[in-house]
Amino acid sequence: MPTGTSPFRCPDHAVSRSEPRGCAARNFPLNNSINQLAILGAAPSFAQPLHVGRPNIANRERFLERTVQMLDRRWLTNNGPLVQEFEGCIAQFLGVKNCICVCNATVGLEIAIRAAGLYGEVIVPSYTFIATAHALQWQEITPVFADINPATHNLNPAQIERHITPRTTAILGTHVWGRPCPVDALAEIAQRRGLRLMFDAAHAFGCSHQGRMIGGFGLAEVFSFHATKFLNSFEGGAITTNDDSLATKIRLMTNFGFSGYDNVIHLGTNGKMTEVCAAMGLTNLEGIEDLVAVNRRNYEAYRAGLAGIPGVALMPYDSAERGNYQYVVVEVDEGTASLTRDELVKVLHAENVLARKYFWPGCHRMEPYRSYYPNAHLLLPETERIAVRILVLPTGTAMSVQEVQTVCQIIAAAVRHASEVRAALNTRARTKPG
Ligand code: T4K
């Protein structure tokens, strides 16, 4: 259903497309001169910071209504009616047989990994959020980092087999930025080499691959509904699977292994989602088409505003698939832009645009992995190259088109005046106290 209409669209509760942020963008003229950049001494373009990951909040009244009903019921957690409704809606929306909501995606990954019986070594990307690797290492399973395809930022199937050893039990791919992994190629390797295949789908709620919604690929997929995610439930996540017996096990493990009162039949933990989180998730799910529309509108404004800026390339989305457009990802080529990604980030931060360097420096360069595998970088040349070139720009319902245009104008001005910017940054670094 790549282009179909969501049954959860809720026109009565449409999201506000340009929520007031309490600060207007200063009008940044198109033909700005260098002294208008904050890094060169001007006032910042934005009075308040523009964040990457400002939460989307679809309909406050509907959320509050659900919350009041929840309080009246005095049922706050432990598989309450809102969680059950949320699970049903997600399963239907994704076209997957089972959905188990969890307190966050990190715990969801830990549970799914354990329920699927992974052990030994598991092949993962290093170019992902640290939780992907931690969910394995937390259970003393070794994450083995494989390199990515620089065009997609996802696992490169051609790099997988060199990492397979007798201890390898699975491949855990991440659909980075919501763009699908090469699912078929990974499934082929997994099948041929007797490995299990799972996906960290934290970024990919509402995205499709070859017309099928992400959520039903591999043994299981794990979504994040963290506040910064496309669809948020404050904190939260969901494990989806078409394997009924795996789903039963996951459900047990999410609730301490309880099967009815006083009867524990499995090892488990506390991975439960609360009712208030489900209320938020359900409300945002109802407004999902509006959330996509705002993200897409902003993405198109970025595309227009960044077009033609030398050395600054906006990551494309496949318009034939459903996407959530949650991440505005830019690759900076220093050779052409005459600025590094890090220099551009400093320019943007000075303007109160808090661009992020996700997923720098890569999991393999963070602890404990850096100490465990000091030479991992030797097999990760593309991860190393991409991690120093990528920046992520703010978007979402807290951001207006005018603000997007201003961000683009800042970037254009920075590149146009790269040598002055670099000189100013060097002077700053020399004169910085301490
Ligand atoms: N797998 C992948 C591939 C992931 O990306 C993630 C999470 C996970 C697994 C694990 O999912 P969870 O266990 O979290 O469900 C943020 C998020 O905390 C994290 O959920 C997310 N990935 C990651 C990509 O980004 P930080 O350390 O960058 O978060 P932080 O606190 O700097 O927040 C980002 C920005 O959002 C800030 O500039 C402020 C703004 N913000 C944040 C919150 C929480 C708000 O404006 N309001 C808010 O309520 O990790």
Image: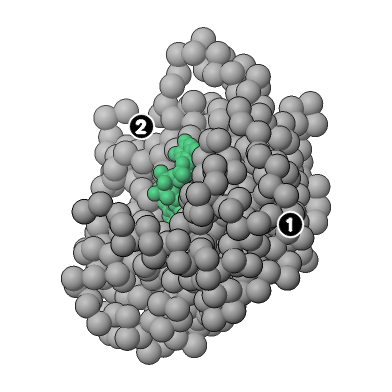
The residue carrying pointer 2 sits among few (fewer than 14), some (14 to 19) or many (20 or more) residues within 10 Å by Cα, namely few
Compare residues 396 and 189 and report the one nearer the observer: 396
4 horizontally vs 51: left or right: right
Q: Position of residue 396 (x, y in %)?
A: 63, 44
The residue carrying pointer 1 sits among few (fewer than 14), some (14 to 19) or many (20 or more) residues within 10 Å by Cα, namely few
172 horizontally vs 316: left or right: left
Q: Which quadrant: the N terminus?
A: bottom right
Q: Position of residue 12 (x, y in %)?
A: 79, 26
- Considering every residue shown, the one lying at the far left of the view is 371
Q: Name the residue carrying label 1.
A: 31
> Compared with residue 2, is residue 42 higher up or lower down, i.e. above or below?
above
Q: Name the kind of residue labelled 1 in the image.
A: Asn
Q: Name the kind of residue labelled 2 in the image.
A: Gly
The residue that appears at 53% across and 32% down in the rendered structure is: 278
Q: Earlier in the sequence, mark 2 or mark 1?
A: 1
Q: Name the residue carrying label 2.
A: 260
> Compared with residue 276, is residue 357 higher up or lower down, i.e. above or below?
below
Helix, strand or loop at label 2? It is: loop
Give the distance between the C-alpha atoms of the residues marked 2 and 1, in whole angstroms: 68 Å
Residue 117 figure quarter: bottom left
